[in-house]
Amino acid sequence: MNRLSVVDEIFLRAHRGMGTPIALQGLWRTAEPVEHELLHRIHEALRTGPLGRRVVRARVPGARPRWVTNTRAHPLALAEQPIPAAAVLDWADEQGFGLDPEFEPGWRMSAAALDDGGYALALTCSHALADGRAVALAVDHALEGTPLAAPIVGHSDWADAKHMWATVLGGTARALRHGPPARPTPPGKRTTQPTTGKIAQSAALQIPAREWNRVAVAHDGTANSLFVHIMAKMLWHTGFPADTIAASLPVDTRDEPRVDNDMAMTEIAITRDDTPSTLRRKARTAYEHRMTSPGGIPEELLQVIPDRWAYTLAKGAGERDILCSNIGTLPDSLLSLGPHPCTGVIARAIHPGLRPDAIPRTRLSGYFTRIADAYTLSLVSLDPEAIPSASALTALARQTLDELRLPATSW
């Protein structure tokens, strides 16, 4: 759609310092160098593809901002010197700067030679442009020309404003017939000591799909419920004191291959007694009941009021103790860069510019993907006191996977 959704605008406000900064990232590794000519071809395909767009604000009050084509892109960023292979995630964490889907290009492609002879490629884009699944679709389109659903052309600003005001005023009037809605529960606050080091720590592990599925079946669960179970166990292993963990679960809602934020959020409460089997049932129920605005007030209200009001009303929306994002199976086209087979592929989110005084409630985020015969568990910790380093996060993941006898290879 060429008009921004409620979710798009939440992520757009984060670029203005109103919310947790989030960028999506795809990351590839090969065992051999990749030619610069090939990288420039991929960059050009992305520049003229669905990520090549920017936000234009409407001049009519109530009309939503719209997307317009923007073929101006950040140049391909090539590291001047090889980077340590063991530090590839640290390098990738630094590629989220300068993304602005309104006034600057909202995505960047970066590449670096590794000191072990391999190569790394990162595509980083504003979450306002795309969710995790959409990033994979955009790359598949760039590499293989795989067709995408045609954009939905919206109405004029005047027509869109009329539609939005009718939706908001009519929906609010219906909701208020049942009395004023309860005040939304503020997000759980978390304090941390100021730090001069990194707030967010990253890790990624690759697990054979056969082994992961074997363990899931043995516990009467699914690949997804085992993922959620592992994320909860990891948080408890950090010393998280509560006996219940609130987990947010993004849900892919697209019915066609589109590059946008086609997602909703739901949540489950996880107790220490839960298993992959019980979490399977909880998740299935939760997917039928998505998070909504309080009291039936139309969520479109957030799009017709000033940004700072909208931020205040939506502050902390979707944030829980852990985030479990199952991005799903990635296209086979992502298994190679031209003639170069990939030794690893991950999709995840990063938090460029996150301040110590603005750490969200979410302590641990996980991004789960499958490609070919392997699952990849990409982790981001936002708890610098409990997890002070990437090695500590990797050790925590390995401990939890070892308890389930799941073999894993670190990135």
Image (cartoon, rainbow, N blue to C red):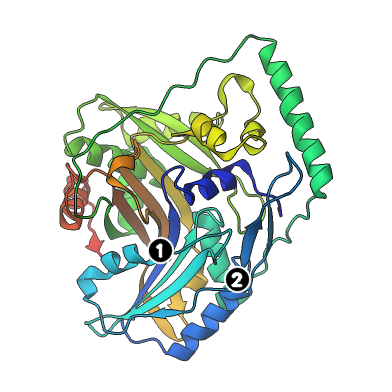
Q: Residue at x 60, y 55 (%)?
A: 260
Q: Which residue is mark 1?
A: 97
Q: Which mark is residue 131?
A: none
Q: Which mark is residue 141?
A: 2
In depth, the one of 379 and 226 nearer the eye is 379
Q: Secondary structure at mark 2?
A: helix
Three-letter code, disc 2: His
Where residue 215 sits in the image (x, y, percent)?
30, 47
Where residue 198 sits in the image (x, y, percent)?
23, 55
Q: N-terminal of the two: label 2 or label 1?
A: 1
Q: Is residue 118 above or below residue 290?
A: below
Residue 322 lies in quadrant: top left
Q: Residue at x 35, y 48 (%)?
A: 366
In depth, the one of 362 and 29 nearer the eye is 362
Three-letter code, disc 1: Phe
Q: Is residue 338 visible?
A: no
Q: Is residue 238 visible?
A: yes
Tell whether 113 sits left or right of 329.
Answer: left
In depth, the one of 253 and 104 nearer the eye is 104
Q: Secondary structure at mark 1?
A: loop
Tell whether 185 sits left or right of 1.
Answer: left
Where residue 31 sits in the image (x, y, percent)?
31, 81
In depth, the one of 54 and 214 nearer the eye is 54
Residue 349 lies in quadrant: bottom left
Q: Is residue 355 above or below residue 236?
A: below
Q: Residue at x 17, y 42 (%)?
A: 385
Q: Is residue 146 above or below residue 229?
A: below
Tell whether 162 sits left or right of 318.
Answer: right
